[in-house]
Image (cartoon, rainbow, N blue to C red):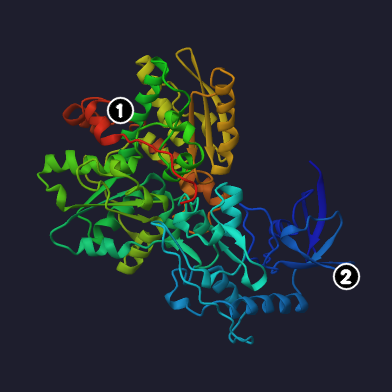
């Protein structure tokens, strides 16, 4: 590793060769303003805010795209740089609607923050706002091109991080737009609803469809039984919206907040994750022991499911038919729980609290999502929407007492909670698959080889002599090479390179889903992952097949994994979908 010695505003700092001036400044504790830059994406130098000077050079450099030079001394702030940056912000504001008070990003907007930091109180340039209609065609994502600042983050994340290419640069100069090709709307494009465009947008130009009003209306309807259930990764992210340290496990506080919001029952989708493992793990064992189609691909992530149906329809036989935890929890609530409690399922409103915008699409993706005889899940809200609901209610979240979820659909194991991390589904499945094959519990249930934030992780796990080859992928752009390996082996008549492949659309898994609190980055991905693994370690029961409520569900209602009843309620089918509608 080659080390470069530089100075930032006179502060000596040592960094690796190739480090950008922007990152070197961070290492020196100096903030350089940016709008287009994001650590997940390659530097485009589009906004021009991060300009710096290098002593001895007449050129002004863009810090995000300029590698440091040995012995260089950089100046990040002087009157000329300040004036140029302020002018850039003022020019952006001249093309941006002055709708801060009614914008979904109010007080959480990078442009608004910069305008305040630069003390901009007047608009010296003539407004040039273009009124462009919103695109509300998608069930998950809304775009408002009038607010676009042309930073390009949405296009870069859609193409380089997800490999979907739903968004393109269309036009030039002031007429540039970040929209689907050929004038299509989002619902006609290859969009898989992952929401990473919204998560990376610095302003309110792309955002999740807000369904909080639907939830409030249901809660205030005396004829409805409104039930909340949150996904695994929600519990380690919500606290960020209330000033708590990143990765703080707030499970008990969320249960209490949901009751104060007026929900009649509070369940936990971790129960659904345990149920998913019972079905998906049993399916894997069945494929392994009955010459089934291998590798088996996980099916928990709706954005990945949508992507597979569009780009890899030849892999449909490999896809696990097990529904996602959310879509298992819904029908069990409206059948098993409704029967046990004498509740009319027609009156139940299932509200799923998810880290993911694609879940809004999933609840209506096909008729299999109404296996209970009713719509299995009625409303999906994201972590961000729940934060807004809690604040609107005036709940002091940080100081809430903790409470427990309602039984039996609130009981979960450590295996259920790690679903929120990349590799978590794989690890949870291996814990139970080992038991299904050997009749014994895995001695070391922590499968470190599938943990971590790498885009692709590969490992071989020994299950009673069976060398199980697995791969874990996060970020859809990374799935291509793994699946091409499978295709090539199939074409050559060889044994598949893997037995089991887990795919999550978002980098790091659900912890940084498209509906999580803004500003997902490596630091908070690590913190959120550590929070989920901590929750796993603190659980008295850490394997899905050991969950007594799951055992009772099978004994009293489902019979066994992959039974006729399980197939009816907990499994689904897939079909080839057009990339463009």
Q: Quadrant of residue 59?
A: bottom right
Task: Choose between 303 and 132: the one closer to the eye.
Answer: 132
**Relative to 454, 102 lies left or right:** left
* Disc 2, SS: loop
**Discs 2/1, front:** 2
Task: Choose between 373 and 420: the one closer to the eye.
Answer: 373
Residue topped by disc 2: 58
Q: Is residue 12 visible?
A: yes
Percent position of residue 298, x then y: 43, 34
Task: Choose between 498 and 179: the one closer to the eye.
Answer: 179
Compared with 153, 15 (above or below) is: above
Q: At x 64% / y 73%, what residue is drawn? A: 174
Q: Is residue 356 visible?
A: no
Compared with 184, 79 (above or below) is: below
Q: Residues within 10 Å of mark 2 (few under 14, many from 20)?
A: few
Percent position of residue 22, x then y: 71, 59
């Amino acid at each position: 590793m080659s080390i470069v010695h530089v100075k930032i505003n006179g502060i000596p700092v040592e960094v690796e060769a190739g480090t950008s001036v922007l990152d070197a400044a961070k290492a020196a504790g100096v903030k350089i303003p940016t709008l287009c830059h994001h650590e997940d994406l390659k530097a485009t130098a589009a906004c021009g805010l991060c300009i710096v000077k290098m002593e001895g050079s007449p050129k002004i450099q863009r810090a995000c795209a300029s590698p440091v030079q040995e012995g260089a001394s950089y100046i990040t702030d002087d009157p000329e740089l300040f004036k140029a940056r302020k002018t850039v912000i003022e020019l952006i504001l001249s093309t941006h609607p002055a709708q801060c008070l009614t914008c979904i990003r109010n007080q959480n907007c990078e442009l608004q923050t910069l305008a305040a930091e630069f003390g901009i109180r007047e608009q010296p340039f003539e407004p040039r706002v273009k009124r462009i209609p919103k695109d509300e065609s998608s069930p998950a994502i809304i775009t408002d091109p009038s607010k676009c600042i042309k930073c390009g983050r949405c296009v870069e994340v859609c193409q380089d991080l997800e490999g979907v290419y739903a968004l393109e640069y269309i036009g030039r100069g002031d007429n540039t737009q970040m929209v689907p090709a050929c004038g299509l709307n989002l619902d006609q494009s290859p969009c898989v609803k992952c929401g990473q465009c919204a998560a990376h947008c610095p302003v309110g130009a792309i955002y999740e469809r807000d369904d909080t009003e639907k939830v409030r209306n249901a809660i205030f309807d005396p004829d409805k039984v409104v039930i909340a259930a949150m996904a695994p990764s929600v519990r380690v992210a919500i606290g960020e919206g209330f000033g708590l340290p990143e990765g703080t496990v707030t499970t008990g506080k969320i249960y209490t907040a949901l009751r104060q919001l007026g929900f009649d029952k509070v369940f936990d989708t971790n129960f659904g994750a345990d149920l998913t493992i019972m079905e998906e793990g049993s399916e894997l064992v069945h494929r392994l022991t009955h010459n089934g189609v291998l590798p088996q691909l996980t099916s928990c992530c709706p954005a990945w499911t949508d992507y597979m149906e569009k780009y890899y329809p030849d892999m449909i036989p490999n896809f696990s038919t097990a529904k996602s935890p959310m879509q298992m929890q819904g029908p069990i609530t409206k059948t098993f729980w409704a029967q046990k409690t004498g509740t009319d399922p027609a009156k139940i409103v299932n509200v799923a609290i998810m880290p993911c915008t694609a879940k809004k699409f999933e609840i209506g993706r096909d008729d299999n999502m109404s296996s209970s005889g009713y719509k299995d899940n009625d409303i999906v809200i994201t972590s961000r929407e729940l934060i807004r609901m809690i604040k609107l209610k005036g709940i002091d979240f940080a100081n809430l007492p903790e409470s427990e979820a309602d039984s039996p659909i609130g009981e979960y194991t450590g295996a259920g909670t790690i679903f929120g991390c990349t590799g978590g589904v794989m690890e949870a499945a291996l814990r139970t698959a080992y038991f299904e094959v050997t009749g014994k519990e895995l001695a070391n249930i922590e499968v470190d080889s599938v943990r971590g934030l790498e885009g692709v992780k590969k490992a071989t796990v020994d299950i009673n002599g069976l060398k199980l080859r697995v791969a874990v992928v996060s970020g859809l752009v990374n799935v291509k090479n793994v699946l091409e390996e499978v295709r090539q082996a199939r074409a050559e008549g060889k044994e598949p390179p893997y037995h089991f492949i887990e795919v999550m659309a978002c980098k790091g898994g659900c912890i940084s889903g498209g509906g999580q609190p803004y500003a997902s980055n490596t630091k908070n991905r690590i913190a959120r992952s550590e929070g989920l693994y901590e929750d796993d370690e603190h659980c008295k029961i850490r394997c899905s097949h050991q969950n007594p409520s799951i055992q009772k569900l099978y004994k009293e209602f489902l019979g066994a994994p992959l039974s006729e009843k399980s197939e009816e309620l907990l499994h689904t089918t897939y079909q080839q979908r057009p990339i463009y509608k």
